[in-house]
Image (cartoon, rainbow, N blue to C red):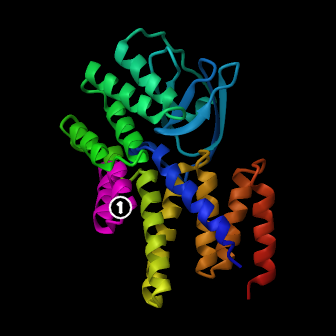
Amino acid sequence: MINTGRARSLFRIAALMTAGLTAISLSSFAQSLPASTLTITSEPSATVFIDDIRFGRTDAAGKLSVKGLSGIRHAVRVRAEGFKETSKSILTSQGEISIPLVKTTEPAELAFQEAERQLSLDRTKAADAYRKAIKLRPTFTAAYIGLARVLSDSGDDDAAMKAIRDLRRITPTNAEASAVEGRIYKDNGDDAKAISAFKRSIAQARGFQPEAYTGLGLLYKEKAETAGAGGNFADEAANYDEATKNLTTALKQLTTAPDAAVLYQLLGLVYERQKKYDDAIRVYNEFLERFPGSNEAPTVRSFIEQLKKEKP
């Protein structure tokens, strides 16, 4: 039943995906409220964050439409190369909002933007640019976090942890820093410290921290696999329950952000491993409702048909 190649691919993508998620206060999150569509107008190719979750880039006309957005109040943040980052509190009932950006010549901001541009090109150059931004503006929180992430992704966990410690001298309770710390501990096999860091991140964010919930979900999934391989089926079941609980919470908080597409497939796969086929089908159907035009939609439909045939 389980496609192991698919499992490995999803778990790898989800682990990488956690690096792109960030946190905001629970006060702006109301999952039970009706979903809305919001259109944001700004500069072309500007990156849009809603509640500090990356939702994508504006098109050539400077527009990005976000469908299925839950809740009433949200914080929208827009970033574009050569411009000063701008944030705005909005109501989804507004339907359309304009967030004009102002050009910037501030050296620290430009160094940070260069670091972000280099992330997919040269990690060493990205790290150097983050360091430059920090030197120019010692309180540049996003630069510290960016530096910690790129150093961790490059395998230099000691330097990444130092960046987190340096940030904590400025903001001792930064939730995103704790989430990054949890990911580093998890990748190094220190489950106890990872769980502590992820839970601290959730507490610091007052409940809204999809990166930390995703990290916990992946960690408990791995613990379940280890327990099952050792014949400890009670621990396997308990850890799978924890995995589904945390991945479900992460999904609710991500709503229709692009990263949610991977989590839907991952959660469905974990339900398959628990032999909870009806739950897996439900999750896959939710994926199709939220991302009907995705490239993965035909494959997910095939998962549903296979489960319907093979479930008891």
Q: Quadrant of the C terminus?
A: bottom right
Horizontal and vertical percent for residue 67?
67, 41
Horizontal and vertical percent for residue 111?
40, 20
Residue at coordinates 24% horizontally, 25% vertically from top-left?
A: 138
Type of amino acid at the residue the image marks with label 1: Asn
Q: Quadrant of residue 105?
A: top left
Magenta residues span 178-205
Question: Can residue 24 be seen by looking at this rendering?
Answer: no
Q: Quadrant of the N terminus?
A: bottom right
**Left or right: 151 in relation to 103:** left
Question: Can residue 199 be seen by looking at this rendering?
Answer: yes
Main secondary structure type of the part rendered in magenta? helix
Q: How many marks?
A: 1
Residue at coordinates 64% horizontally, 53% vertically from top-left?
A: 261
Residue at coordinates 32% horizontally, 34% vertically from top-left?
A: 144
| Residue 60 is inside the magenta segment | no
Q: Secondary structure at mark 1?
A: loop
Placement of 125 over or under 188, stated as above or below? above
